[in-house]
Image (cartoon, helix red, strand yellow):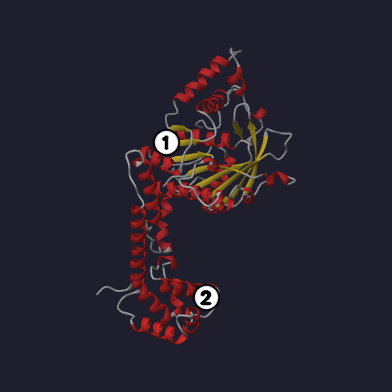
């Protein structure tokens, strides 16, 4: 005999109202309107800390077409139909399956495939079906069992995501697989330079890394990279017609370094989350950088820009978790931080902040403490799930697009750039 799982769950609530908070379903999953109404009313009462009883439920169901007497008879019938041999857990599972099947059917009903739209429609279907897949919940684990991870500490790890900048590494340790790391700053502060410096560090450490650049051309990315690798002023690289002094030797040395960076993949253009996911599926990167988040094209139009950016943020987070890799996303800050006396930003200044702040494992913020001094930058770990907050000073050489720990005069002319091997 097929069980009406919706009716059985409502019977459980009527018999034991306190169970409503533990049922792993939502009101929108009920296909029968009156069952949905009862469930949502009980959840609302529970959320407010109010007692759930039959009288309150009955009064909420009374309409000009259904008297209190009729409602009570209806509720009594539901209680009498309760099949005690069927668990609430089973009913919840079956209701979720029924809801997903209905939603999948509706998705397929609206699909019109043609040779011209087959790729885009299949991409959209992938996203839609990803959205209704049910993730498997994990069982609790005893603390004593977590000791199995003890061998992962105080030894060389197989993959180390260090930046080469101790102000970051000392406070974060190493980025974890599945993390979404936000690097946020106002325009022209240096967030792209910092991200590229870290990405190159990863690549030179043998990690296959993708840099999705939505703001600059390939030529501009090359100019930044060769300025960093050669130590030649970027303005000279862009504008000079002849080499001066030892520039030719430095330029060739810089290009030789870049030629060795086969592990760093540079993408430029317009990208959607599904494009980044497709590239990850093809290349199996160990780290992904997105420069920057607010320029990613939404997979579909949402009600407002905040919802679109939230969907993009969640999509990037999901790519990291599905592939067990860190994803770095650059983000713009709004102008509010510039109103502060010390110019220090906070998470509230993240554009379309709510979802970004929630999805991020770590938020790194950069700012200029003094607009007259373009070389001194402040950096802080605003949000660190495994660390506390911290703030440090860095030096930034804008002509070479490099961040340093110390003042420039402390570095010799032939010192290795920060992302070289020690």
Query: Residue shown at 75%/46% (left/top)?
Result: 341
Query: Residue shown at 36%/72% (left/top)?
Result: 6
Looking at the picture, tell me which residue is in the foreground, 357 or 2.
2
Query: Of the residues under marks 1 and 2, which one precedes in the sequence?
Result: 2
Query: Residue shown at 62%/25% (left/top)?
Result: 412
Q: Nearer the viewer, mark 1 or mark 2?
A: 2
Q: Is residue 321 left or right of residue 333?
A: left
Looking at the picture, tell me which residue is in the foreground, 84 or 408.
84
Is residue 145 visible in the rendered image? The answer is yes
Circle 1 SS class? loop
Residue 94 x/y as whole percent: 33, 67
Looking at the picture, tell me which residue is in the foreground, 272 or 150.
272
Reply above or below: 350 against 267.
Answer: below
Q: How many marks?
A: 2
Is residue 360 visible in the rendered image? The answer is no
Residue 145 x/y as whole percent: 40, 61
User: What is the number of the mark on residue 45?
Assistant: 2
Circle 2 SS class? helix
Q: CA distance from mark 1 to mark 2?
A: 52 Å
Reply above or below: 173 against 371.
Answer: below
Q: Mark 2 packing: few (<14 Cα in 10 Å), some, or many (20+)?
A: some
Residue 121 x/y as whole percent: 37, 45
* Residue at the disc numbered 1: 208
Q: Mark 1 packing: few (<14 Cα in 10 Å), some, or many (20+)?
A: many
Q: Is residue 325 left or right of residue 238?
A: left
Furthest-front residue in view?
65
Residue 273 x/y as whole percent: 45, 44
User: What is the number of the mark on residue 343?
Assistant: none
Quarter of the image with the N terminus is bottom left
Kindly check if marks 1 and 2 are in contact, taking CB atoms under 8 A apart as contact. no
Looking at the picture, tell me which residue is in the foreground, 406 or 366.
366
């Amino acid at each position: 005999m097929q069980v009406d799982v919706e009716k059985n769950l409502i019977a459980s609530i009527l018999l034991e109202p306190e169970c409503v908070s533990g049922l792993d379903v939502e009101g929108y999953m009920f296909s029968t309107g009156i069952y949905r109404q009862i469930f949502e009313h009980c959840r609302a009462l529970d959320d407010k800390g109010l007692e759930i009883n039959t009288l309150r439920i009955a009064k909420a169901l009374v309409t000009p077409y259904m008297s209190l007497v009729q409602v009570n008879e209806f509720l009594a019938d539901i209680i009498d139909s309760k099949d005690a041999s069927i668990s609430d857990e089973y009913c919840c599972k079956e209701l979720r399956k029924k809801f997903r099947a209905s939603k999948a059917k509706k998705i397929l009903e609206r699909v019109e495939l043609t040779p011209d739209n087959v790729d885009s429609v299949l991409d959209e279907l992938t996203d839609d079906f990803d959205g209704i897949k049910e993730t498997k919940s994990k069982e609790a684990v005893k603390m004593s069992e977590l000791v199995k991870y003890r061998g992962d500490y105080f030894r060389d790890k197989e993959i180390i995501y260090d930046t080469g900048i101790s102000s970051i590494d000392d406070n974060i340790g190493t980025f974890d697989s599945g993390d979404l790391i936000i690097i946020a700053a106002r325009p022209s502060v240096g967030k792209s330079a910092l991200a590229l410096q870290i990405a190159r560090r990863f690549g030179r450490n043998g990690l296959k890394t993708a840099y999705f650049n939505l703001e600059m051309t390939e030529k501009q990315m090359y100019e930044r990279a060769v300025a960093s690798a050669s130590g030649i002023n970027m303005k000279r690289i862009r504008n000079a017609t002849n080499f001066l002094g030892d520039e030719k030797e430095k330029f060739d040395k810089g290009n030789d370094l870049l030629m060795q960076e086969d592990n760093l993949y540079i993408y430029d253009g317009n990208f959607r989350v599904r494009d980044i996911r497709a590239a990850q599926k093809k290349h199996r990167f160990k780290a992904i950088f997105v420069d920057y988040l607010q320029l990613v094209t939404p997979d579909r139009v949402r009600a407002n820009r905040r919802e679109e950016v939230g969907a993009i943020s969640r999509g990037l987070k999901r790519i990291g978790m599905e592939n067990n890799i860190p994803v770095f996303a650059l983000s713009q800050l709004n102008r509010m931080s510039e109103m502060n006396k010390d110019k220090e930003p906070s998470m509230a200044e993240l554009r379309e902040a709510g979802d970004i702040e929630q999805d991020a494992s770590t938020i790194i913020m950069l700012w200029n403490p003094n607009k007259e001094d373009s070389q001194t930058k402040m950096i802080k770990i605003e949000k660190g799930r495994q660390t506390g907050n911290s703030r440090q000073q860095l030096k930034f050489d804008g002509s070479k697009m490099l961040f340093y720990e110390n003042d420039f005069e402390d570095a010799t002319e032939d010192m290795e750039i920060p992302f070289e091997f020690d």
